[in-house]
Image (spheres, helix red, strand yellow):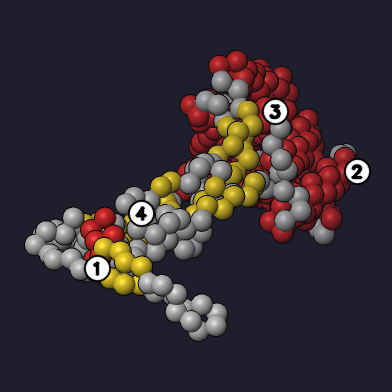
Amino acid sequence: MFPNQSFRRVKIGKIDSLGIQEKPFTIHEDAIVWPNQFNQTRPISICNDHCGSGYSRTKKEGKPFCCYDCIPCPEGKISNQEDMDDCFQCTEDQYPNIGQDICLPKDISFLSYDEPLGISLVTLALLLTFTTTLVLRIFIKHKETPIVKANNQTLTYVLLIALFLSFLCPLLFIGQPTKITCLLRQTAFGVIFSVAVSCILAKTTIVVLAFMATKPDSRMRRWVGENLAISIVLFSFLIQMMICSAWMIVAPPLPDLDKHSVTKEIVLQCNEGSVTMFYCVLGFMGMLAIVSFTVAFLARKLPDSFNEAKFITFSMLVFCSVWLSFVPTYLSTKGKYMVAVEIFSILASSFGLLGCIFSPKCYIILVRPELNSRGQLSIRKN
């Protein structure tokens, strides 16, 4: 076992408890396992210390096999023993700790009613819902006044009801996603907003046609009326309903677990199913908004009593700005904050419509009632 070495006999004795040495016995030295012999069977590093947990080792080029570097585990991986050659990945429902030597369980995450963000959004939604209800009550109470009658009462009431429902839509987005809420929240949002924007489009269209109908021998007079307004709203409603129905048939939204977007959380969310159909809903709504903005911009200076076109122009500018900024923000956000971004966009755009269109009228009805008269209508026309 040890070439070129001579061996000698070694006497080993033992002293008993009384201090008397017992009879010695003899063994050969080659029967003893010395440290250098142990190293030949299981070598240890003579170049560096052990690589601890959280690190993996890699061989140093040009150095003996027992020399290596200790490299920290890459992000998302751990090592839980010394001198591991490779780090390994945690399971999908776990994540590495700071030292990258233990896998910890991920928390379930969704936008709930209990956390501050959820409470804030619910409070804001309910406050705006109450405000819309108050505006609707003011208009119903003063329905016989010229300012309420001037711009198609039916469209005004339908628009206020649509805004009322749009402020309630965020309640479908908050809380643990279920199959019903996932199916309802995007379709309800898309249909309600399409009705609201189509009401604005109908209002501006009626203003333009009413001005054109004042010209002698104009054929536009037969188009001016409530039937045209209702047709525009109904047509828009049906198209959006068809898009949403196709979405529900092709690939409906369903509850899903996102285990990869956020490192320390499993996000419980609604998988939109078909992203293409989701953007079709947004696209149709955006098309209505752009057409409404264009018509309102062209009609903003028409000499009509209580002409809403200039207020509608500004409201649609706010509406389009909110949703243009929504898409990149939504795509760059992760986890439950994606839901919060969509809720904020719904509330902000709805409030833009409510504030820009109805606050001037409410100001005249409540603060300056002397302007809400037929005499003032004649003065404003002239």
Rendered location of residue 172, percent (x, y): 72, 38
Name which residue lies at 81% across and 58% down.
Answer: 368
Figure quadrant of residue 174: top right
Q: Earlier in the sequence, mark 2 or mark 1?
A: 1
Per the model, the C-alpha gap separating discs 4 and 3 is 45 Å
Is residue 105 visible to the viewer in this orientation of the structure?
A: yes
Dot 4 surroundings within 10 Å: few (below 14), some, or many (20 or more)? some
Dots 3, 1 in contact, CB < 8 A: no
Q: Nearer the viewer, mark 3 or mark 1?
A: 1
Q: Nearer the viewer, mark 3 or mark 2?
A: 3
Rendered location of residue 180, percent (x, y): 73, 28
Q: Amino acid at mark 4?
A: Met
Most foreground residue, 266 or 88: 88
Per the model, the C-alpha gap separating discs 4 and 2 is 79 Å
Q: Amino acid at mark 3?
A: Lys
Name which residue lies at 45% across and 75% down.
Answer: 22
Q: Amino acid at mark 2?
A: Lys
Q: Is residue 3 left or right of residue 151?
A: left
Q: Pointer 3: what residue?
A: 179
Q: Pointer 2: what residue?
A: 141
Dots 4, 3 in contact, CB < 8 A: no
Q: Is residue 342 left or right of residue 279?
A: right
Q: Pointer 4: what residue?
A: 84
Per the model, the C-alpha gap separating discs 1 and 4 is 43 Å
Q: At numbered mark 4, what does the secondary structure look like: helix, strand or loop?
A: loop
Per the model, the C-alpha gap separating discs 3 and 2 is 41 Å
Q: Earlier in the sequence, mark 4 or mark 2?
A: 4
Per the model, the C-alpha gap separating discs 3 and 1 is 85 Å
